[in-house]
Amino acid sequence: MPTGNTPAPKHDAYAVLKVRDFRFFLIFRFFTTIAFQMQSIIVGWQMYELTRDPLALGLIGLAEALPNIAIALFAGHAADKYNRKTIIVWFTLLFLVGTLALFLFTVPKLGIIAALGVLPIYLVVAISGVSRAFLYPSIIALMSQLVPRELYTNSSTWNSTVWHIGAITGPAIGGLVYGFFGVRVAYLAVLLFLLTALVLLGFVKNHPAPPVVKSETLVQRLSSGLKFVYHNQILLGAMSLDMFAVLFGGAVAMLPIFAAEVLKVGPQGLGFLRAAPMVGAVMMSVVLAYRPPMVHAGRNMMIGVAGFGLSIICFALSRNFYLSLFLLMMSGMFDNISVIIRATAMQLLTPNDMRGRVASVNAIFIGSSNEIGSFESGLAARLIGLIPSVIFGGIMTLGIVGFTSKFAPRLRKLNLKDIG
């Protein structure tokens, strides 16, 4: 600790990038994120072209969410018991097999879509949900093994930055390739990115599974992550806040309709719309890399979620493509504040032998709410109309912030300096 006139050590925004394994891990995440986001936008546009039904877009999210939720706790248990890198390799391969199947569905001579309709696409999306259920806790837990504790905030910021850069690039590439070269070439591009990611992961050293701290039955291990989060008001409040905000406030699933019918910009424009929130998130990540959100973290998190809700409401009212891009960018900036604060709190408050299970609970709260939120958005758009449904979601997000602020005072008063 600095004393007297000794200056405090200067914050190094790039400290974690000096760790070799973490650098390769980040590049792996970059390429997998591009692949996942490309596939998401390709499937969404393909489904809309085949059905012209907003509910069909929502069902894509439900098809991924249900298997994800069903297997999430077991995936977290696996991440805390087995080699995390090995799990990542196998389930990235499973996702790759699903992408290959989607490519084969587009081959006219096979006639799969002509014979069975869109059902095979939903089945592959469900397989992707299983894959991502195992990938998320293993990736989050492995990241904590690659860096020392004092770099957790720095690693969360750069992990979020790289993820969002990939999430910008993926939709843009997916939309452009689909628009100019067609669906088959687009799926082949996804396969290329997945193969590249697997090669890069090979440069990350193996880290042993964490030692088992106490003897537990399988049921106890599966439920321990839930109990840990339930008894921690900070984690429970942070996960719940983001879960309901994403559940009601997400307009991403409806972007193909906005692109086609409201803004009339086609698949190329859809790629830019999908990328816009990620551009904002990257901009905020750069700010937070230099000014880590340690002090008044809880208050800042709630401001970020409220800003996200307001941005979504304004987006629903926009009829100008460039204004819509700006509003989606702002939504990404506000959203990333809460993402980084939640990720840092999870790393600091969770012991190493429970990181996979707690991450799997977070996946149930946050990750699956994206997909269930897509279903909610599609159903609401079918029932009350596209624009009113998005406005309603933004208003609900603001209400959730007020509710959480009142009933989770420890989260509202959170100061990450106190637990760092």
Image (tube, rainbow, N blue to C red):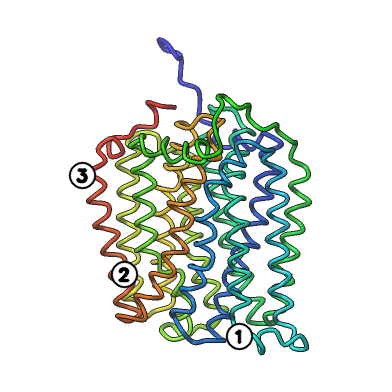
- The x, y position of residue 246, in whole percent, is 39, 59
Q: Residues within 10 Å of mark 2 (few under 14, many from 20)?
A: some
Of badges 1 and 3, nearer the viewer stands 1
Q: Secondary structure at mark 2?
A: helix
Q: Residue at x 72, y 75 (%)?
A: 103
Q: Residues within 10 Å of mark 3 (few under 14, many from 20)?
A: few
Of badges 2 and 1, nearer the viewer stands 1
Q: Residue at x 44, y 79 (%)?
A: 55
The amino acid type of the residue labelled 1 equals Gly
Quarter of the figure with residue 109? bottom right
Q: Decide which of tag 3 and tag 2 comes sooner along the chain.
A: 2
> In the image, which disc is placed on residue 406?
3
Q: Secondary structure at mark 1?
A: loop
Q: Nearer the viewer, residue 67 or 16?
A: 67
- Which residue bears the numbered disc 1? 117
Quarter of the figure with residue 146? top right
The amino acid type of the residue labelled 2 equals Cys
Q: CA distance from mark 3 to mark 2?
A: 26 Å
> How many badges with numbers are in the image?
3
> In the image, which disc is placed on residue 314?
2
- The x, y position of residue 218, in whole percent, is 56, 38
